[in-house]
Amino acid sequence: MGYNQMQELEKKVDEWEPKIIAFLCNWCSYAGADLAGVSRLQYPPNTRVIRVPCSGRINPLFILRCLQHGADGVLVSGCHPGDCHYMSGNYVARRKFAILNNLLEYLGIEKGRVHFAWVSAAEGGRFAELIKEVTEEVRALGPAKRLVKSE
Amino acid sequence: MNEGELMPDTSTMIRDTAKKLLDEKKVNLIIGFEKGTLPLRSTPCFIRSSEEAEKLIWNASCENNLARYLRKRQEKIGIVAKGCDVRSIVGLIKERQLAREQVFIIGIPCNGMIDRKKIDAKLDGREILEAEERDETLILKGHNFTETINKEEFLHNSCQTCKYRNPVIYDVLIGDKVAENEGIDEYEEVRQFEAQSADERWQSFTDEVSKCIRCYACRNACPLCCCQECFVDNSQPQWIGKTTNLSDTLIFHIVRALHTAGRCVDCGACDRACPMGVDIRKLTKKIQMDIKQLFHYEAGISVDDVPPLATFNPDDPQEFIK
């Protein structure tokens, strides 16, 4: 490998890439992500998936801690309304998310840091598109600065 | 009229009611207010005999939310409660922290409590040695000065926008109901804050929170903070750091506010307890406004309705969800 090539590669490594934590519910969105993979759909590699039993499992602290400890964006995705494996987990979660989402915006956290979505197990294509969309939005915002904990 | 005994009618009526309740053994304990050690200070007191009941008073500095003292008691309690205290009691009953039968509510229609910080600012360092309360005014006396101020202008912010001055439930009501605050936009401050840019909002939020020393007085004063173990005390998992690191403190305030969603009655106890003057209500008031707009719910009005975050409507707004 030539010196120039090396330099170029190093520059690439130094380039900032958004780091996004995706909380996916076990029954719909996680299976949707699986379907995207099985279908060999391409999407940006910026998300790290955390599987949760239900979107109702999400504690706002999960999201805030992600932003505090190095995530540039957070995505929470669950079953479409009416499809929840536990009947009403996503409905109750939706109220909680509405309050959280409004409060974060009110306090001045950039719109587009925290995303909420419904993705079913059959929506592999939609999942890939969603990840593209979220990644681009977070990329446009740049690295997270607010809420980040500096030691 | 003695100082500290500023509204004799109400005070006397409270005493008589308390004595009667204790003598008839309808309650074992009365929680009310007694004269504080400083002018314009009343302090919560716990009365167990009718002789002690002489201590009870009522005036415009009975600001503490006494609902805070109701939990985890076995005996039957009589409580002197103004509008916001009663709304907090409703919250406690709704959350099964208290049985309705366990508490005898001595409801007091309230004209708002005065904010000593506002008075101190007005007096500019001069010390109050004596205060005398009239219907609408307050006469403050100190070394070489006497000032008469209009109470209305020196109420706590939460009292100025209060829409439930009269108790929503009670077993006995002391005095006549007062006129409710009509035509006041209780969310005006929230709207003003919202009108700023995101950067400005973030700046002012961090400025506000950087005053915080994490003493948790706001949590301890809140009548509805009743988790077995608070998330800030948890060590397994340790949700947030325990120092005054700004990021941790920001998250503490965000989550504390979120925990009041659909429950906060805006009594202002957190705000008054804060030794550093952090504007805590800026967060809770916003959540209250959202709860009202999104889910058409106000906390502490009825014992029978379901808390908004414990239920749902299939048609709840979801424009923010992709």
Image (cartoon, coloured by chain):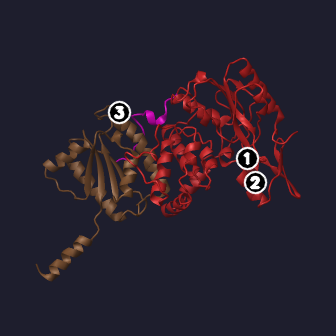
Chain colours: A brown, B red
Give how far apart the Cα atoms at labels 1 and 2 are. 8 Å
Q: Earlier in the sequence, mark 1 or mark 2?
A: 1
User: Which picture quadrant has residue B75?
Assistant: top right
Residue drawn at x 51%, y 47% as measured from the top left:
B257
| Residue B74 x/y as whole percent | 57, 25
| Label 1 close to label 2 by CB (< 8 Å) | yes
Instruction: Say yes or no: labels 3 and 1 on the same chain.
Output: no
Residue B129 or residue A72, whichever sits in front: B129
Residue B276 belongs to the span the image colors magenta: no
Using the image, name the chain to which the residue with label 3 belongs: A
Using the image, name the chain to which the residue with label 2 belongs: B
- The reply, left or right, for residue B70 in relation to residue B63 is left
Estimate how packed mark 1 is, as few (under 14), some (14 to 19) or many (20 or more) residues with alpha carbons within 10 Å. Answer: many
| Residue B99 x/y as whole percent | 56, 24
Query: Is residue B319 at all visible to an observer of this figure?
Result: no
Q: Is residue B72 above or below residue B27?
A: below
Q: Circle 3 sits on which residue? A: A88
Per the rendering, the mark at residue B114 is 1
Residue B267 or residue B242, whichever sits in front: B242
Q: Circle 2 sits on which residue? A: B119
Type of the residue with mark 1: Ile
